Amino acid sequence: MRLKTTLLKEPKHILFMVSCVGWTTADELYSCSEDHQILKWNLLTSETSLVVKLQEDIYPIDLHWFPKTVSGKKQTQAEIFVLTSTDGKFHLASKIGRIEKSVEAHKGAVLAGRWNYDGTALITAGEDGQIKIWSKSGMLRSTLASQGSPVYSVAWGPDSDRILYTSGRQLIIKPLQPSAKVIQWKAHDGVVLKVDWNSVHDLILSGGEDCKYKVWDSFGRLLHSSSSHDYPITSLSWAPDGEVFAVGSFNTLRLCDKTGWSYALEKPNTGSVFSLAWSADGTQLAGACGNGHVIFAHVVEQHWEWKNFVITLTKRRTMQVRNVLNDAVDVLEFRDRVIKASLAYGHLVVATSLQCYVYKNWNTPLIFDLKEGTVSLILQAEKHFLLVDGAGLYIFSYEGRLISSPKFPGMRADILNAQCVSLSNDTIAIRDKSDEKVILLFDALTGKALGDGKPLTHKLEVVEIALDQCGPSTERKIALIDKNRDLYLTSVRHLGREPKICKIGSMVHSMAWNDAANILCGIQDNQFTVWYYPSVVFTDKELLPKTLYIKDGSEFSRAPHILNYVGTKVTLRQGDGSLVYSSVLPYPALLHEYSTSARWEDALRLCRFAKDQSLWACLAGMAMANRELTTAEMAYAAIGELPRVQYINFIKEQPSKESSLAHMLMFSGQVQEAEATLLQAALIYQAIQINIDLFNWERALELAVKHKTHVDTVLAYREKFLQKFGRKETNKRFLQYSEGVEVDWEKIQAKIEMELSKEREKAASLSVRSSVTSRR
Ligand SMILES: *[C@@H]1O[C@H](CO)[C@@H](O)[C@H](O)[C@H]1NC(C)=O
């Protein structure tokens, strides 16, 4: 990826530095300079025109257009902007350059002016060290901070409830709410000159006189520090989707990944770049240059890879598709600028500023119009894909049909990113921004909330989610990483019951599901880990550690990030930006396939052939989940789990189907379900007995009393239990019932025998009856 820059031969703001730039649309930019001129740049016609010549005493410093999206309504064009100047004023100006209002704001220059995201407040920062908040019409609301040194730069937090500003070498995050905690830290070894804060992922950029730029999280933790440049960092700016950012310095323009490493370095003849601005669709970048130039740039040479195809954005409207198997090259041309693209499941989806193109082969795309020109995210599942733009979230089929458009209260589509949205054939999951513990789940086909509409709530804030992609929708699972970096798995269709959220990993920093089997890979404590069969946690959680493949991560550089996991190939981006690939053996995927299609003989053969304990462990879990006891017994035997083998034999010997089902549930630790199964089949004694076996004495007695049977059995077992440990009865209920009940083991044994033979007889008669019906 790199920046393609354009610079006119002669600067338009002759001999004067350009101080600020701002986009009105993706093709129109305003620039202001010390020559008092405001110029308008039309990129479609390549024309530059004078908007207005300001009064001689206005030396502009900063310009910011009023946000286009205000309370959900989207205007097509920005209409007013704030302009700050050296004389301590800020000015509200219209599109035609008329100054509607000038406000005395600070002593000395007003160094920065920024609207919040919904346009309800303006913040200004001054040379006088003050930070002030103003209403939309320019009325002073409050002075938020006052310090001894100039504030060079300010930025709003994602929810417009906090601001970030510079204070010498320090950075300060101050909530608007007076009682909330202020965060302050030393950020640079020189004065900090510029900051920016991205609302999609909440990351902060800073640059300063120490000639470095840095990436921080919003707690002030350093994520990346650049090496020292030759000159101070005078400008920086996040692209709106937060995937990349630009950095400006003397004769220098850099394009960086969000993790900080640099994609590309340009050395244009610009002097210092004082301000940088991205167009709202993220395709264009403009810089205000010290030598009177305005530099334009756009991102090219972005790559997408899937299986044997590599696609490159060669120009703004052109892509090259290379099939690496035969080196065949196709060129795709678009009418408008490419804004976003995604390649997966045999389909390429490209969003331009006006249309969406869907390719299955390279010569006949399906094309449909887009309502909004600013697609910020594309996600694909095998059946359909999801587009996010400033106004909403849409599921389209690969035939271009709008399938659904889920909505929820407080939805802010502009801040959705790939970590907090996930799509499968049947489900859409969205991590709620207003309560980060909550995951909203929607049916992909209808766009309606799943099940009873109750979202999934985790005990901690969730930072990343991913839906598995295979198997029936009723078994759809979601993997989530929480704030503590613990990895959990749960089911999304839990039919009214509280879902079980099971932990399957810790210190997990990145994850991806495979596209063809429900296998998960992740970076766990710097090791590359593959969960061959994560769902095993629901059948036999002791097996989970045995089903993992762990590879030492020392071959990867710092903080690798998983981009995708397609077939047997995992693509990772390393901390330095380079791509590395890791491969996973094909056997686990094959085993999933055999299990799904109940080909147990083939599954056993595969495990014998591969001689891999982790495969046997997977097979044990898969067979058990499918109640395939013979296979499960062999697989457990192969990994030496003899108590499990015995339990399976015990299950097989159960007199009725209900009892064996109940014990299978017990095997997976689903005690309540097991009890319910028995009670439903009127197997009261059996339900009591499983509680006795688990020492759930109170429940056992409760059932016995309620059903007026086997009270003596419960008392007898309880007495035996207490005797064994040399203890006396203290439980009131047991004391109460043992009065007047005599424990006679012979009688009890006989009663139990009778219950079991009754169960056997009933099961036998049922099976005769069913074989008769099936013969008819
Ligand atoms: C997903 O949808 C595609 C296309 O309709 C289908 O071929 C595939 O089997 C589906 N996968 C699952 C897991 O339902």
Image (spheres, helix red, strand yellow):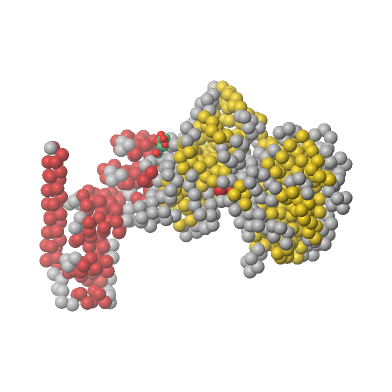
Q: Quadrant of residue 531?
A: top left
Relative image position of residue 146 (x, y in whole percent): 75, 65
Q: Nearer the viewer, residue 458 or 537?
A: 458
Task: Classify 713 as above or below 208.
Answer: below
- Please provide percent x and percent y for residue 278: 69, 43
Residue at 21 percent across and 49 percent down: it is 657
Left or right, residue 393 beside residue 209: left
Q: Is residue 527 above or below residue 130?
A: above
Residue at horizontal 19 percent and vertical 65 percent from the top = 707
Give the quarter of the figure containing the C terminus: top left
Q: Is residue 507 above or below residue 262?
A: below
Give 174 or 516, whichever is nearer the viewer: 174
Percent position of residue 408, x then y? 49, 52
Q: Quadrant of residue 123?
A: bottom right
Q: Is residue 534 left or right of residue 760?
A: right
339 vs 649, left or right, is right
Q: Is residue 458 visible?
A: yes
> Residue shown at 52%/58% (left/top)?
435
Residue depicted at x 23% and y 68%:
701
Residue 572 visible in image = no
